[in-house]
Image (cartoon, rainbow, N blue to C red):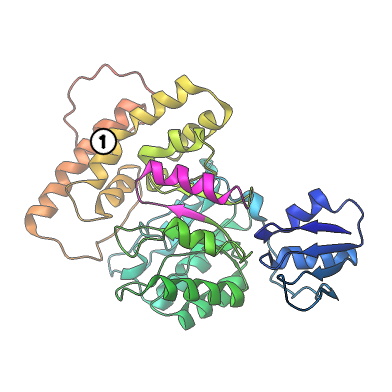
Amino acid sequence: MIRIDDAVITAQTLEGRLEGERQVEIGPGSKLTPSAQDFLHAQGVEIVRREASGQAPPTTTLAPAPTPAAPRAAGRQAFAGIFCPNIVLLDSQNRINHAEMERYINWLIEAGVHGLYPNGSTGEFSRLSQEERQDVVRLVCEVNKGRVPVLAGASEANLRDVLKMAEYYASLGVDAIALMPPYYYEISTESLFEYFAEIAEESPLDILLCNIPQFTQELSIDLLERLLPYDRIFGIKDSSRDLPRLLNTMNCLRQQRPNYVVMTGCEELVFPSVLMGASGGTIATSGIVPEVIVELYEKAQSGDIERARELQYRILDLINLMLLGVNFPEGFKTGVAARGFDVGPARASSSASEQEYLIKLEAQINCVLADMGYPVQGPRACPATNLPPIVGR
């Protein structure tokens, strides 16, 4: 019999230590994840639960039969690289433009993005109706046809609707859902824990948590650590723009779950994050220059430091133009338009001066894209930069 006292025991833990033993003794403070229980049941291993000092003697049980779960098309190992939080293209009537969306999704996949992330912040999920959010994910899955994993945003105003969306997305073949804290009403840390724990127990799909304190409550590292026993929650996407926090997240959580996925949601941090071990990122700029962002990730991953550093610095002007000085995500939509797609009207209201600024912004974005080596159309009055192209090399 082997004895394990780890706070969280996963299937990976058992694979490395069991070595043919037919009984495993679990300490009183240890938590078996669902994957660990499934593994023990499949191997026919008995669980001996050791009680705290002074209590009843150990009890022996067989691991419970695994609970059937929705099949995973891609597997958790596929959640690495660059996932594009795509914008939603609209027609002249402010409805989802299905034909142009199909062209855009195919373009992103062919340009090399490693995954798709519909209904993220860049996709303006909060400005879409529930039916439109479902329509966007259905369209993405139909066009994708399993070529890359799909991470669907399932953040809703209440737990019941989150689970309803998760069930619908599972029926479409989505690989996992992205989930941020419930918005508008701030709730206590204990309530946040119960919220995510209940969803993790009931969701038919794996869950990537989202920390985006600009828009909702921050997910503390302590809270993430408390949620580690819930095997459905396989990682975190961090959009806090805080590199020390990202590093501490990886350092803390991967000590207990080495395969815990940690992705950055900030393009300015792709290179240092991946260099330090991040799994990748959900990067809005990949919807405009997917070739550059994918190469940045791949060069950082392979250790080509000079090329990765060059690409990281060269995207800064573009992200600053699209992110600052304009309602989010209108700058990114202007960038997608500059790449030749009909983005349609804005869902958010804007003033006359803001609309005028967007016209100037288009010319500035065109200049940056031209410097990168992209063929561009439309107005531009570019200062001479003498910068070498970074695409087509």
- Foreground of the two, 270 or 213: 213
Q: Quadrant of residue 171?
A: bottom right
- How far from the left and from the top, in percent, is residue 198? 54, 77
To which residue does mark 1 refer? Answer: 366
Task: Answer left or right for 135 relative to 124.
Answer: right
Which residue is outermost to the front? Answer: 54
- Image label count: 1
Which residue is outermost to the bottom? Answer: 160
Residue at the image position 54 percent from the left and 64 percent from the top: 227
- How far from the left and from the top, in percent, is residue 79? 59, 51
**Residue 361, placed above or below residue 9:** above
Q: Is residue 237 magenta?
A: yes
Residue at the image position 30 percent from the left and 29 percent from the top: 370
For label 1, the SS is helix
Type of amino acid under label 1: Asn
Residue at the image position 37 percent from the left and 73 percent from the top: 188
- Foreground of the two, 38 or 50: 50
Q: Which residues are magenta?
A: 236-256
